Image: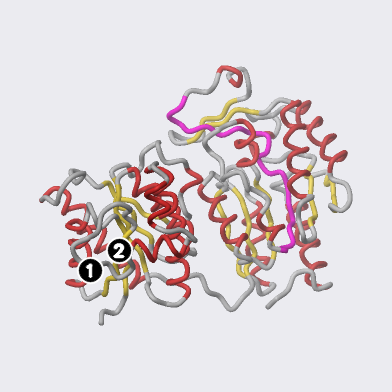
Amino acid sequence: MGDKTILVVGTYDTKAAELDYMLGRIEAMGGTALSMDISVLGDPETPADFSKHEVAAEGGHTIREAIDSGDENHAMQIMARGASALARRLHAEGRFDGVVILGGTMGTDAALDICQALPLGVPKYVVSTVSFSPLIAPQRLSADIQMILWAGGLYGLNAVCKSSLSQAAGAVLGAARAVEPPATARPVVGMTSLGSSCLSYMKLLKPALEARGFEVAIFHATGMGGMAYESIARAGGFACVMDLALPELGNLMAGSVVHAGEDRMLNAGAAGIPQIVAPGCLDLIDFAGWQEIPERYRDRPFHAHNRLIKSSGLNAGERRETAREMARRLRMSDAPVHVVLPAGGIEAWDRPGEPAHDPEALAAFCDEMRAQMTAPLCFTELECHINDQAFADAVLGIFDAWVADGTIRRG
């Protein structure tokens, strides 16, 4: 038996040669491989360790239902549900350590679901004809997914596609050997922020929280970071969250691609995790550096952070909308929520003389926050900037009170 076991997933009726090649490479490097067949119509020459019938059944369906649907999209979604459920169960049982999935658009669609079904820290590799393609919506990507383009391999095994397949086989086995899955003896505080040129409170909060015996995980709120934060919150992985940077919410409302999904700000509350929340950077709309700023935002304050990301400002009416939506989401929480409003500014570029300085719009936002953040939400307004020591001190004061009264548990 090899030291680590890799689950190899794909449509074994049409891609058996490619899948078996990866399986062979894994075993040649000292690993063990298990095969899972997610095909619908055909049968592989060599039975897979987990057949298409087992996959469909795990999702509450049969292959006959998939075939009789008469629609390949519906059929593959049946297989994706079953494969996701089966992979989740097998991993919980300790049956495999990492997964590699092969596919074109159909297989990739299923692969994204399978990867999202597995927890953070499980190596997830997708070999796809559409890797890194704009066809893949950011919210479909799991936090630690890895992808490689399946170049030249759409139909049949060849020397070109072996390069991609062999890299994926080695990468997933190496990752399974090297990974340290999230595990800590200390309770974890999940925090959202942006780079320290914009939001710097993390420099003050992290050492203070560590001195109190907590570990701090800080997530970059630029879409993928928010999705990782939400996935861990959904699983109850935090003792408390400090959700202090909310540009992903504003981006979602404005239709920007730089967002973290429709469930942003909902998972911690649903999991019963106490939340300290502030509207850091909720005055900006982030755009991908390669895209044109939409016409409606071109007369706004503008900041080009780098070639990957640039931002425009929200006007007064739009900021009021974000405050209302923020309150709506936080009211769904099953745990205490304390909102902190630094009325002196919510990111570095809104200070006087900076490109996002807009005192009228900030005043409108603060006015709406006062109106919306009512019971059962707790609300504290501060006459300081979000990057000031006074803001960090106020957040720590709320945190300490919750530790003292048992709202935040140490174990």
Label 1: few (<14), some or many (≥20) within 10 Å?
A: many
Label 2: few (<14), some or many (≥20) within 10 Å?
A: many
- Could you tell me residue 29's position as x and y percent? 20, 72
Front one among 11 and 335 = 11
Q: Is residue 114 left or right of residue 27?
A: right
- Could you tell me residue 143's position as x and y percent? 48, 55
Front one among 274 and 186 = 274
Residue lying at the far bottom in this picture: please name it: 1
Disc 2 and disc 1 in contact, CB within 8 angstroms: yes
- Could you tell me residue 22's position as x and y percent? 21, 62
Q: At x 79% / y 69%, what residue is drawn?
A: 407
- Considering only vertical position in the picture, is 248 above or below 317? below
Disc with the residue nearer the chain's start (2 vs 1): 2
Mark seen at residue 294? none
Residue flagged by tag 2: what amino acid is it?
Val
Q: Which residue is mark 2?
A: 8
Q: At x 74% / y 62%, what residue is drawn?
A: 274
Front one among 81 and 116 = 81
Q: Which residue is mark 1?
A: 26
Residue flagged by tag 1: what amino acid is it?
Ile
Q: At x 45% / y 77%, what residue is drawn?
A: 93
